[in-house]
Image: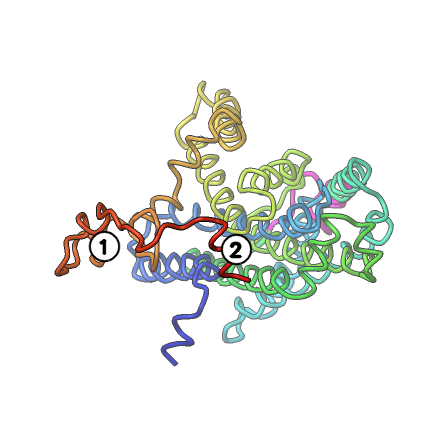
């Protein structure tokens, strides 16, 4: 048991541990009433952003396809899930755990409908590549947003937005982080399986993947569908964290913001997407709080400037040496014991100059050894014969 425990690759589970710690610590503070409303709101937004970033990372980072319609799938989940919750909550008002039942049903409906849209859009769109796929997904997002914006007030609220019930603030972000945990589990188990190796093979070289017998269309559609499912779930969470769902939120700029989270965290890096999503969301909300009044016009400027600095630091060739020397991995390595490091041979207690012997090693190495008989090539050849 101890051997099996020691052989676990803990680096694969650090993100689970981090999410669990945040959920338990802040969840306990929230239930006890010791957490400010502003912090609760921030945690809700961070959980939603992480779900969006990790789900988009499946398409962009691991599959290698550029999608700009993630906000569109989130919009579908937010409106349809919000509509279901608005209809169910009055009906279940007198039922025990009526709000919880409405939330679960809304999450299922919003996620599944977004997944269906992912299949419908993915079947024709995934036959395209590069910029063409990006244009199609971008168009899908704008079409969905325009449709909901032009609906009647009785159906989805029209331009004024859809009014949705607000779930209890103390518990919503806890539920959101539990769903983040589920998203991480699905994503990481998929990528580290044989199906994940097929997906990354498609990213590296689609022609070679086809030649080895990989069903490229099946895997592309599966990844696109799963990504859309979690985007729809994030949309339902968004509808529950706000009193109104407005189509203006799910614009092209929001899709770009989600893409920035993935790119900034590193293509194909789940942990990087988590960190980048939390950082960008924190930065965005804090700028909205600090830059008010006449300074509000500087919000986008400061936000863009910070992103430019971070991107340059992560990618500038001139800073490569600095990044390699001063990073988290090297910092952790200083406190981690290694089994064998040739660079640290001077710390070896069995070094030859520390082992006591009858003959001094310096004398032995300086001894001039004389052979009993002179060696000549002719004599050696005769003896060999």
* x then y, percent, for residue 272: 51, 46
Q: Residue at x 81, y 51 (%)?
A: 121
Q: In the image, which residues are magenta? A: 146-163
Q: Is residue 255 left or right of residue 12?
A: right
Around disc 2, counting alpha carbons within 10 Å, would you say few (fewer than 14), some (14 to 19), or many (20 or more)? Answer: few
Q: Is residue 273 left or right of residue 354?
A: right
* x then y, percent, for residue 321: 44, 31
Q: Secondary structure under badge 1?
A: loop
Q: Residue at x 60, y 64 (%)?
A: 186
* x then y, percent, for residue 316: 53, 27
Q: Is residue 48 above or below residue 254?
A: below
Q: Is residue 93 above or below residue 259?
A: below
* x then y, percent, for residue 131: 78, 35
Question: Does label 1 or label 2 sit earlier along the sequence?
Answer: 1
Marking on residue 206: none
Marking on residue 351: 1
Image quarter of the N terminus: bottom left
Foreground residue among 132 and 175: 132
- Residue at which label 2 appears: 381
Q: Magenta span has 154?
A: yes
Q: Secondary structure under badge 2?
A: helix
Q: Which residue of the protein is positioned furthest toward the bottom in this rendering?
A: 1
Q: Magenta span has 170?
A: no
């Amino acid at each position: 048991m101890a051997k099996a425990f020691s052989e676990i690759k803990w680096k694969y589970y650090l993100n689970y541990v981090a999410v669990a710690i945040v959920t338990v610590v802040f969840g306990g503070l929230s239930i006890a009433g010791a957490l400010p409303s502003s912090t609760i709101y921030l945690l809700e937004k961070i959980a939603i952003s992480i779900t969006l970033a990790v789900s988009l990372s499946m398409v962009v980072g691991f599959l290698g396809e550029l999608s700009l319609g993630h906000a569109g799938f989130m919009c579908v989940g937010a409106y349809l899930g919000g509509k279901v919750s608005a209809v169910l909550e009055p009906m279940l008002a007198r039922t025990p755990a009526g709000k919880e039942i409405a939330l679960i049903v809304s999450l299922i409906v919003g996620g599944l409908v977004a997944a269906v849209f992912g299949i419908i859009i993915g079947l024709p769109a995934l036959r395209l590549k590069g910029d063409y796929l990006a244009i199609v997904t971008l168009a899908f997002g704008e079409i969905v947003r325009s449709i909901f914006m032009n609906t009647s007030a009785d159906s989805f609220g029209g331009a004024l937005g859809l009014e949705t019930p607000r779930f209890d603030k103390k518990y919503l972000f806890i539920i959101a982080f539990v769903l983040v945990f589920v998203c991480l589990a699905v994503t990481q188990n998929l990528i580290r399986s044989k199906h994940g190796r097929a997906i990354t093979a498609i990213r590296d070289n689609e022609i070679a993947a086809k030649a080895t017998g990989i069903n490229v269309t099946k895997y592309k559609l599966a990844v696109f569908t799963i990504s859309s499912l979690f985007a729809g779930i994030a949309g339902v969470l968004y509808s529950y964290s706000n009193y109104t769902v407005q189509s203006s939120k799910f614009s092209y700029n929001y899709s770009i913001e989600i893409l920035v989270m993935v790119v900034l965290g590193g293509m194909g890096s789940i942990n990087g997407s988590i960190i980048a999503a939390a950082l960008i969301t924190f930065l965005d909300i804090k700028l909205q709080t600090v830059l008010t009044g006449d300074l509000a016009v500087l919000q986008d400027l400061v936000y863009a400037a910070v992103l430019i600095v971070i991107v340059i630091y992560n990618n500038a060739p001139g800073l490569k040496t600095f990044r390699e020397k001063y990073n988290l991995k090297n910092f952790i390595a200083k406190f981690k014991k290694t089994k064998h490091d040739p660079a640290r041979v001077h710390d070896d207690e069995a070094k030859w100059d520390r082992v006591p012997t009858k003959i001094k090693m310096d004398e032995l190495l300086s001894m001039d050894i004389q052979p009993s008989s002179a060696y000549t090539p002719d004599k050696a050849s005769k003896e060999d014969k």
